[in-house]
Image (cartoon, rainbow, N blue to C red):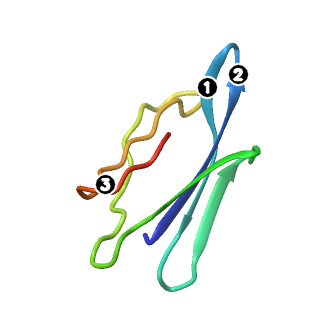
Amino acid sequence: MQSATVTLGQYNGRTRLFSLSLSTNQGRSISAGTPTSERYIFTAPTGWHIAGFTGRAGDEHRQAWCDLPEGVSARL
């Protein structure tokens, strides 16, 4: 994966992940969820790639985690 776009929103008084879109360097993409206006884009630096995410299975996905190289920061 080359980039991941997430959108957040409020649900039951908590911030939740509402949508996730993943893109490859080959121009392919997949997305799920209902996008909101609070959007964050994570793009892999040169020589890096996004290998995956971790979270908990259930009715909804409440958390996502990714490892960023030193010096790269993101708010999520």
Mark 3 to mark 2: distance in Å?
27 Å
- Lower sequence index among marks 3 and 1: 1
Quarter the N terminus occupies: bottom left
Q: In the image, residue 14 lies at what x, y percent?
A: 62, 18
Q: Residue tagged by mark 2?
A: 11
Relative vertical location of residue 35 with respect to residue 22 in this rendering, above or below = above
Q: Residue at x 59, y 30 (%)?
A: 60
Q: Residue tagged by mark 3?
A: 68
Q: Amino acid at mark 1?
A: Thr
Residue extending farthest to the left is 70
Mark 3 to mark 1: distance in Å?
22 Å
Label 3 vs label 2, nearer the camera: 3
Q: In the image, residue 40 lies at what x, y percent?
A: 58, 51
Q: Residue tagged by mark 1?
A: 15
Q: In the image, residue 39 lies at what x, y percent?
A: 65, 49
Q: Residue at x 44, y 40 (%)?
A: 64
Occupied quadrant, residue 31: bottom right
Q: Residue at x 38, y 50 (%)?
A: 73
Q: Amino acid at mark 3?
A: Leu
Q: Amino acid at mark 2?
A: Tyr
